[in-house]
Amino acid sequence: MPLTIRPFQEEDTEDVIALWQACGLVVPQNDPRADIQHKIRFQPDLFLVGCEAESGRLLATAMAGYEGHRGWINYLAVAPDSRRQGIGREMLATVEARLRALGCPKINLQVRGSNTAVIAFYRRLGFREDEVVSLGKRLN
């Protein structure tokens, strides 16, 4: 299926949130609207959506960031009824190309340990588990 990958636009908001909900990415401690608003204020060109070329239907998202040392990928999502067609791989390749163009030497991402299918997806694409402990601290 031909895919058009482009930067997020404000009118995509409802479709993006619906996709994230369908993919199980929305959790109580993360407000998807707030996450979108934060991202469009900082490196909005690294918040991408993938749309079916013919219909314009939003099928995928990828939110990336780069702070000069390491790149991060968040919210890589593909509509459940459109998986296993190479869409996630294409989204990831586009994000990687944009990060590479910024001089990014390494990409990190986090996946819930229980999400074994997604872990297997990333492994097939060359990602490996780092021997690190992921720590977090909420500031709000």
Image (cartoon, helix red, strand yellow):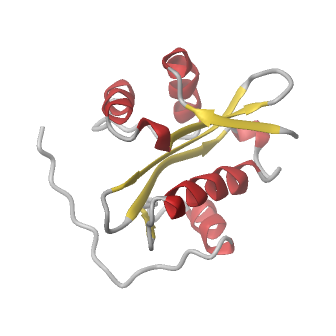
Residue 116 in the image: above or below residue 2: below
Q: Between residue 45 and residue 131, name the one nearer to us.
A: 45
Question: Does 96 sit left or right of 73 as displayed?
Answer: right
The mark total stands at 0
Location of the C terminus (image quadrant): top left
Location of the N terminus (image quadrant): top right
Question: Does 68 sit left or right of 93 as displayed?
Answer: left
Furthest residue in direction top, as rendered? 11
Identify the residue at image location x=11%, y=44%. 139
Identify the residue at image location x=45%, y=59%. 102
Q: Between residue 36 and residue 114, name the one nearer to us.
A: 36
Question: Does 7 sit left or right of 139 as displayed?
Answer: right
Residue 109: quarter of image: bottom left
Residue 120 in the image: above or below residue 11: below
Residue 40 coordinates in the image, percent (x, y): 38, 30
Residue 71 coordinates in the image, percent (x, y): 41, 62
Residue 15 coordinates in the image, percent (x, y): 58, 22
Furthest residue in direction left, as rendered? 139
Identify the residue at image location x=56%, y=39%. 48
Residue 20 coordinates in the image, percent (x, y): 53, 34
Q: Between residue 31 and residue 113, name the one nearer to us.
A: 31
Identify the residue at image location x=54%, y=14%. 11
Question: Does 135 sit left or right of 69 as displayed?
Answer: left
Q: Between residue 135 and residue 116, name the one nearer to us.
A: 135
Residue 54: quarter of image: top right
